[in-house]
Amino acid sequence: MRRVLRLALAHVVLLSVAAGQEAAVPVRLVPREGDAWQADLGTWTAEALVVHSARGLRTVAPKDLRAVVFLPPPGARAPDPAGLEVAPLCAWRLEERLERVLARLAAEARRPIEVDAEVAPRRVALALDAATWRTALAAVAGRVDAEVEEGPTGPRLAPDAAAAPFRVVVARPPAPAAAPDAPAAPPEQAPDVDLIAPALAWLARAQRSDGAWSGALPAGAFDRGTTALALRAFLSVGHSHRFGDHKQAVRRSLELLRARPVASADGPATNVERLLVATALCEAYAVTRDYLLKAPATAELAEALAARGPGGGWGLRPHAAEDTFSTWLGIQALLAAQAAGLALPPASLEAARDRLRAATGEDGRAGLRRPGRGLALTLADPAAAPAAPLFTACAVAGRRRAGEPRADCAPALEHLLASPPRPETWDPATWHAAALALAPDGDARGKAWLARLRGAALALRHAEDDELAGSWAPAGLWGDLGGRVATTAATVLALEVEARARRVAQQAGEPEEPPAPRLGGR
């Protein structure tokens, strides 16, 4: 029926307005200071916006604006409550100035489209067959070097929403949940199989002779980050270079991370890699108190702290716009340093927590940088990325680990509980953060969610008895960056949170809040 509706509504949109016949473009201007106000936009250049308001003709400098919101024309119908799925399929032929294109898209969408004032105005030309207005908006964003994010009131264009080549997945309808009476992986039927030991054995076999683990990016661009993740997996279950069955693997990785410099600032995920290395070295020092680890841990921590943004959070690159995912990694580094007894700047943990709170809306959903419905960060085709609530999971995990009460995080926790792990949405980066957010409560719903995590991991683990036995295929953001190694290591971190929660429940008649996770589970 929906397909019939789409085809019935399909039409051709032509945007070729002759000079002198241009219609008014209603906008709301959001200044950096003061209240927003509405006007009709005339022209928009890099130097000035010419608008007509109740006060007459005015010229506004883009540097004085935070955003320009393109509004549906007065009297336009409200958006269809069914949302994007019933948007008409159109053949879009667009060749006009950016402000005219966005005005037409806002009219077709019947909702406002916000644009950061830093987006460069220019002429836009594109041709799309059988596409919705949102597809056209995404194509327009590509022409002006911007990304489409999902804000609390609708879509918005932001320059470099994530450092290239990352892409943000937004506004994807969630996959339907399994029926309660027939779950995809019934927790009570999940076999009590040891998933962690075989995974660590595979990681030890996959380690290179120089102590590193190979990532998925060319020229070893994320090998240090992949190595740090693998090291954290061993540390999370009590293995170190002094104790456990994998002392040699841990020792070789520590020697490599101590000896090699931090990643280049030109890398695609410089801060991600730097924060992972700082966390791993701080955790190793906290666990072993090996004095040879204190200096490199302190140095990596200093580099990580120096890369913070002005708001106390982290971006994907040093001093880049702060984002939820990187700031969550930063909080893990701060907590590891705190456990190791290393000095931290005053209120650094609180500042990072406040940054995550600012990215979370009243409904509990967090976006990449501000409240919204962002789902994932990917290097791959966004259409192929798992529809997992990465930003919401990272934001609430960071807030809780930094001491925020459960009651203040309740809306976000409800979103996580409503999105249990499933094989088709497997993303270890998301589920590790979500497990850390949910495990401290020890209630029935949280335990059922953790059991679903274990069931999904069991269903996806490499089942053949070959060289890949015990590992997991690349999935989610860690799969994009670090391949099978990073995916397996992050899955171990998530499973250790689940296993710890089960141990606590078995040791107590009425489960209380479990102790702080082992360092590698941060």
Image (tube, grey):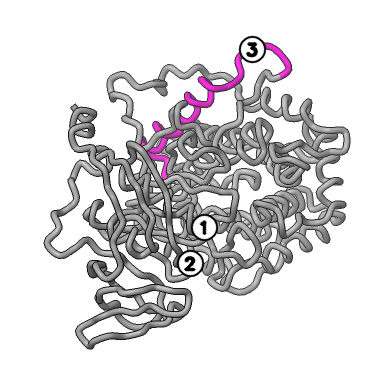
Mark 1 falls on what kind of element? loop
Whether the residues at callouts 1 and 2 have beta carbons within 8 Å, the answer is yes
Mark 2 falls on what kind of element? loop
Of the residues under marks 3 and 2, which one precedes in the sequence?
A: 2
Circle 2 residue: 120
Report whether residue 362 is seen: no
Residue placed most toward the observer, 164 or 519: 164
Image coords of residue 201 (percent x, y): 73, 25
Whole-Å distance between the Cαs marked 1 and 2? 8 Å
Specify the farthest residue to the top.
465
Query: In which quadrant will I find the N terminus?
Result: top left
Q: Is residue 465 rendered magenta in the image?
A: yes
Of the residues under marks 1 and 3, which one precedes in the sequence?
A: 1
Rate crowding at label 2 as few (under 14), some (14 to 19) or many (20 or more) other CA atoms within 10 Å: some
Prevailing secondary structure class for the magenta stretch in the rendered image: helix
Circle 1 residue: 145
Amino acid type of the residue tagged 1 in the rendering:
Asp
Q: Is 449 situated left or right of 240 in this image?
A: left
